Image: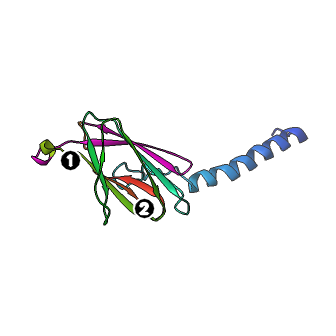
Amino acid sequence: MQILSLSQMIKFTGVALVIGFTVPVLAQNPPARTYQPGYWQPIARVNSNSLVTVTLVNQTKFPLSYSFLDERGEKKLAVGAIAQMKITTLPVNIAIYDASPQASAGDDTRLKYETSVTKNSIRVNVVPTTDEGSNVLNISKTGAVYAY
């Protein structure tokens, strides 16, 4: 039987304590694996208690229209144009679409919203896509930003 020195016993005790505290913590808190990409995940977040600025940028080769899904009227967004809106009340839904006669005739124009947020300002670069596109930008009451 080998007798441990005092310094070896202290090292052994330290290692045992680290393992004793670490292993149960790791076993109790496994990494989250519940994230599933999809339209139900917010693409950005803003502070819902402050003024929100939304900037739309038409980066397509055709004019767009946009409207709030309420009593406000439709507005035009020319090629390369920028529209900026100040939002004071959430939730809000903004439809962005190709209102040309070709689109109305059934030619499906798909749009992608490339979104970034800086200091409660949302910049939405609207670009054409061949993938499944979006038609509505939604900012929820809690400040979560979705594209549908």
- Taking the spot 31% from the left edge, 56% from the top edge, the residue there is 67
Q: Picture coordinates of residue 103 (x, y %)?
A: 15, 44
Circle count: 2
Pick the residue in front: 76 or 126: 76
Residue that badge 1 annotates:
99
- Taking the spot 57% from the left edge, 57% from the top edge, the residue there is 28
Q: Is residue 120 above or below residue 114?
A: below
Residue that badge 2 annotates:
140
Q: Nearer the viewer, mark 1 or mark 2?
A: 1
Is any part of residue 34 visible from this angle? yes
Q: Is residue 51 magenta?
A: no
At label 2, the amino acid type is Ser
Q: Picture coordinates of residue 70 (x, y %)?
A: 31, 65
At label 1, the amino acid type is Ala
Is any part of residue 5 visible from this angle? no
- Taking the spot 57% from the left edge, 54% from the top edge, the residue there is 29
For the N terminus, give its image quadrant.
top right
Dot 2: element: loop
Extreme residue in the top direction: 61
Pick the residue in front: 123 or 72: 72
Pick the residue in front: 6 or 29: 29
Q: Residues within 10 Å of mark 2 (few under 14, many from 20)?
A: some
Query: Earlier along the polypeptide chain: callout 1 or callout 2?
Result: 1
Dot 1: element: loop
Pick the residue in front: 22 or 50: 50
Q: Is residue 124 above or below residue 87?
A: above
Q: Is residue 107 magenta?
A: yes
Span highlighted in magenta in the image: 104-129
Q: Is residue 57 above or below residue 139?
A: above
Q: Picture coordinates of residue 121 (x, y %)?
A: 51, 49
